[in-house]
Image (spheres, rainbow, N blue to C red):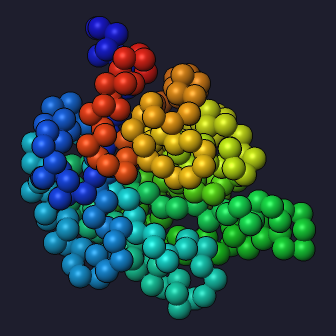
């Protein structure tokens, strides 16, 4: 086997409009049977219209694709640790509908994952061990919201992956995932979010996020950034220490799915070339 063929294969986060409309994207995805993460369940109102229609459209668009199919779950205004029981019911319904939409999309195939956002914020991190410490509250509220969602994910064979956003302590999210006692709950790392947290809020570097996640790491959003904001730049345009990140990934027993998540999906072509030239991924 050649060195190139032994490199991990990058997946792509995309909308169905992008898959069908961006020149070369479908060939890029299908040609290597790359994992896909469909983003059509994110926009406010998308699921309320008809999640089944999104699923059917995705299934048709991905005919001939043999990689894994995942989705990014909805998140605008949908906190996984929302304290209001009436709002919690809405959040649960949105997540459950998204899972069922994924099942329609992946009918007869592997419905791989759904990304959910972490409940941990910079405010939380900077108020640990003060009168505003909310560690126990976050844990209890997240369980109250996600327990039925976890049960549905288990039934469908889907892994819920908790993605870092503002997380300063990478171990908190790992412990939260483990607290469900379910193989259907794992951890995601967004490399750009981790770089922002490292440079702006005192979090450890990106490779430390990988090591903290360990065997619970099932998914990585691969994007480049400068540590100032959530850039989602093509790989090589920011200042993430990619050799260190991929060395940490190589130390895991199982390589998590690696999903390029860029502000402009057309950057996936150059990103894959850059990582392949570095001997890291393809």
Quadrant in the picture for the N terminus: top left
**Farthest residue toward the bottom?**
86
Q: Image check: 251 left or right of 222?
A: right
Up-down: is 158 above or below 254? below
Quadrant in the picture for the C terminus: top left
Question: Which residue shows up at 61% across the image and 37% down it?
Answer: 206
Which is more toward the observer, 174 or 234?
234
Which is more toward the observer, 22 or 134?
22
> Is residue 156 in view from this perspective?
yes
> Is residue 218 in view from this perspective?
no
Residue 188 image point, x, y percent: 51, 48
Question: Which residue shows up at 45% across the image and 30% down it?
Answer: 236
Would you identify the image quadrant in which residue 131 lies? bottom right
Question: Which residue shows up at 63% across the image and 57% down it?
Answer: 166
Residue 185 image point, x, y percent: 51, 55
Up-down: is 55 above or below 113? below
Which is more toward the observer, 101 or 122?
122
Residue 64 image point, x, y percent: 9, 42
């Amino acid at each position: 086997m050649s060195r190139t063929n032994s490199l991990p294969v990058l997946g792509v986060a995309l909308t169905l409009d992008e898959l069908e409309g961006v020149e070369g994207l479908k060939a890029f995805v299908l040609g290597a049977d790359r994992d896909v993460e469909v983003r059509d369940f994110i926009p406010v109102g998308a699921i309320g219209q008809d999640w089944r229609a999104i699923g059917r459209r995705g299934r048709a668009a991905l005919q001939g694709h043999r990689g894994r199919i995942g989705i990014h779950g909805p998140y605008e205004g949908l906190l996984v640790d929302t304290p209001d029981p009436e709002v919690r019911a809405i959040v649960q319904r949105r997540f459950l509908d998204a899972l069922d939409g994924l099942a329609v999309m992946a009918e007869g195939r592997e419905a791989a994952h759904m990304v959910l956002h972490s409940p941990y914020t910079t405010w939380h991190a900077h108020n640990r061990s003060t009168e505003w410490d909310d560690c126990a509250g976050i844990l209890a509220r997240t369980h109250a919201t996600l327990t039925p969602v976890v049960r549905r994910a288990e039934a469908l064979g889907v892994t819920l992956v908790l993605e870092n956003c503002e997380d300063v302590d990478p171990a908190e999210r790992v412990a939260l995932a483990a607290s469900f006692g379910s193989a259907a709950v794992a951890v995601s790392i967004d490399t750009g979010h981790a770089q922002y947290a490292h440079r702006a809020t005192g979090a450890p570097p990106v490779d430390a996020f990988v090591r903290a996640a360990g065997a619970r790491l099932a998914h990585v959003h691969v994007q480049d950034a400068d540590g100032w904001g959530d850039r989602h730049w093509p790989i090589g345009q920011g200042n993430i220490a990619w050799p260190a990140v991929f060395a940490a990934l190589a130390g895991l027993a199982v390589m998590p799915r690696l999903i390029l998540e860029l502000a402009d999906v057309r950057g996936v072509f150059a990103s894959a070339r850059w990582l392949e030239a570095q001997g890291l991924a393809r």
